[in-house]
Image (spheres, rainbow, N blue to C red):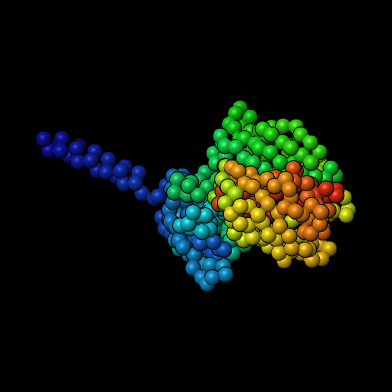
Amino acid sequence: MTGRRGIIGIVTVLLFGMALAACGGGGGTAGDGGGTATIQGSVPGTAFVAVDDDTNLEVGRVTATGTSGSPKTFSITVPTGRNYRFFVMENEGTANSRVYPMYIGTNNVFGLDNTANGQVISLGMVSPDLTTGRFAPANHPALMMGQGATSMIPPSLAGSAFSMDNVIGTTWSYNTMMTSGEMGWAHGTMEFVSGIAGITAGITSITTNIGPGTNENFAFSMDANGIMTETTGDTSFHGVMSMDKSMIVATRTNGENPELWVMMNGTAGTTADMTGGWVMHSVSSGNPGSRDWTYGHSVVDAGGTSTFTGMMGSGGPVDDAEMTFMMNGGVMTMDGSGGGMMGGGMMGGGMMGGGVVPSTFHGIMSGAKNLMVSTYTDGAGGYPFSIQVK
């Protein structure tokens, strides 16, 4: 009996030792650190988040502190012996929160082994790259070893991330402007669908300043920051989605012609939604006499009549005037009478070229009902593109 108890005791000790070995160290391909490291820096946003790359779960999140209008500082302590991804947040805790991954070169996964134990790692200022939508630190600490890149987003941040799921199965209205070559405008509708080629943006209707256009298909991708690219070879296309995910603004080169695109989602907007004060900026392509800009203020009443005041054009002050708009399902059109402005005043005096052809006017309203974008023909060789902000 004593012998059996001895054998059982030895086996128990061995199993207990194996359990201890399995539980220790924190795991991770960076090696068993057994300690902690402190990461510090400055960010323009509100929070700095550390994510375990192996589990895709947050290890820690700290709110950056500082005075308004200045970069804010953060300090976070994390266990060593792990691989991490780091994220910067803006507008944390609001409907407009946005998340950006931190990259150093091509890496966004970083290993902290035991050489980082007890060390303070300074990233310096972590600043945005507006081209890629990523954040990069001023310092490249040797203790943070690059381990490659991944597009994974932790579940706790996924609600703030962007993806093509935000556009699949939806119809968008768009306005475009060409700024050289075959100058002019185009507007219509497009749909995003999921297919074998990925996410395809199909233009379902298109009208141009010279008549009906040709429907096209594109294939797009979008990263977690809302940066949108075309995946079938058009490297000139670059778009970005608004924080409320209802608008996409993009530029591309169509042949040799630079284009500006604004796309709005949904069917928001009635004539009554235009009521209030707006600030307008407009720029026109076309013949040399119509390539101008204009800005000013307008007030729209409940019936859609807009009174423009304080207008300034590239050629000087522009007369005050009125015109009438209608909004249906987020699409804005112009009263056929032109509001009494076809013969002179604001439009005839050069605000947006030589006038306006009401039948060509096409505007769209944002989901938040605080932004309107429009295109039209001015009747004198100009093709204005106008943005109004409430």
Q: Is residue 164 left or right of residue 292?
A: left
Say above or below: 147 vs 298. Answer: above
Q: On the rendered structure, is 142 left or right of 7?
A: right
Camera-side residue of 296 and 183: 296
Could you tell me residue 15's position as x and y percent?
A: 27, 40
The image shows residue 51 at horizontal and vertical percentages of 47, 51
- The residue at the point 58 percent across, 54 percent down is 302
Residue at x-position 84% and y-position 42%: 182
Residue 349's image quarter?
bottom right
The quarter of the image holding the N terminus is top left
Residue found 31% across the figure and 46% down from its top: 20
Report if residue 387 is visible in the image: yes
- Image x and y of residue 275, in percent: 59, 56
Name the image quarter holding the C terminus: bottom right
In this rendering, position of residue 345 left or right of residue 108: right
* Total marks in image: 0
- Give the x, y percent position of residue 41: 54, 64
Name the residue furthest bottom. Answer: 67
Judged from this view, the residue extending furthest toward the top is 196
Judge by depth and name the residue closer to the eye, 77 or 181: 181
Q: Nearer the viewer, residue 360 or 267?
A: 360
Examine the rendering and report whether any part of residue 259 can be seen.
no
Residue under the point 63% across and 52% down:
304
Q: Residue furthest left?
A: 1
Q: Nearer the viewer, residue 355 or 289?
A: 355
